[in-house]
Amino acid sequence: MKTDSVFYHMFQAFPQLLFDLIAQPSDNAPLYRFESVELKQTAFRLDGVFLPPKEQPDWPVFFVEVQFQLDPDFYSRLFAEVFLYLRQQHPKHPWHAVVLFPTQSADPGEHQHYQVLLTGGQVTRVYLDKWAQPRETLMQRLMGVLLATPQQAINEAQTVLGQLRRTEAIDTTLTAAIVNLIETILVYKIPALSRERIQAMLELTDVDLKKTRFYQEVFAEGEKTGRQEGRQEGRQEGRQEGRQEEGTTLILRLLQRRCGELSSALEEKVRRLSLPQLETLAEALLEFRGLADLEQWLASHE
């Protein structure tokens, strides 16, 4: 499973999660901007950077790294990325690194070259299995879905969704983000199952599905177009074509922003995709680095 991609979704949807993980007040979380940063002229990419407002020079820049595999060179790479970022970007803010390990066994441990940094208060190491116990808060329960085995993940997800449905006071926007995030985690964690099969196992209703980000961004507007065409023509095909065209237009716009200008051949391949394929592509393109990734995805889904 591409864990760093899942955490990218989580931090985008719930910036307060970072502050929960390091046991700091989350009042300032909405003012931070979360990004994935590629460092110039290197092969380094920081998993995530929380950037504070420029008018708050005392607030730290948070570097967030997700490390789910034991790697003896992890700290060498981490601090190389941090200091290269500081050299290239010249931020006026202090910095703080947050490292997320699934368990303590994934932590390579102390390192003589970086001991001062690791113990000097600028690095926080979080072991998620311990942090997520007991399953009291919503963030802890979501983390339980991510940490569970594929066999257990469905049960964990069903528990979260069941509690969500019983909580009448929860914000509708938050509900949509949680439903979307749980579905995304399971798509990554259990790739052998189709999205439709996962939705059925989670007993997601039409109301739940209409709260997901993809539906709201693509198909809600497309459905509106479809209804208008259906009234004009009196045919069900109008609604279907409206959803298809609206979804395709949005996906092409997102792809151009992510990958650059598309050739006419690539654009035509995207236009031939079905609605379920467009939904799958919408999730996948968040990880694309360029046109080569798009070409590979299209080749594997033809």
Image (cartoon, helix red, strand yellow):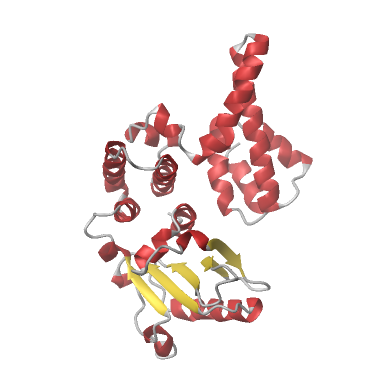
Q: Is residue 78 visible?
A: yes
Quarter of the C terminus within the rendering: top right
Q: Which residue is found at the position 70% from the left and 48% from the top? A: 256
Q: What residue is shown at x 23% (from left), y 60% (from top)? A: 133
Kindly tell me whether residue 73 is visible in this rendering.
Answer: no
Image side of residue 112 versus residue 92, left or right: left
Dividing the picture into quarters, in which one does residue 113 lie?
bottom left
Give whichever of 157, 135 is nearer the camera. Answer: 135
Residue at x 42%, y 27% (from the top left corner): 206
Q: Is residue 92 left or right of residue 178?
A: right
- Identify the image quadrant of the N terminus: bottom left
Q: Give 71 or 220, whichever is nearer the viewer.
A: 220
Q: Position of residue 252 (x, y in %)?
A: 68, 41
Q: Is residue 36 above or below residue 178?
A: below
- In the rendered view, would you say 266 is above or below 18? above
Q: Residue at x 47, y 38 (%)?
A: 212
Q: Whole-percent x and y of residue 297?
A: 60, 45
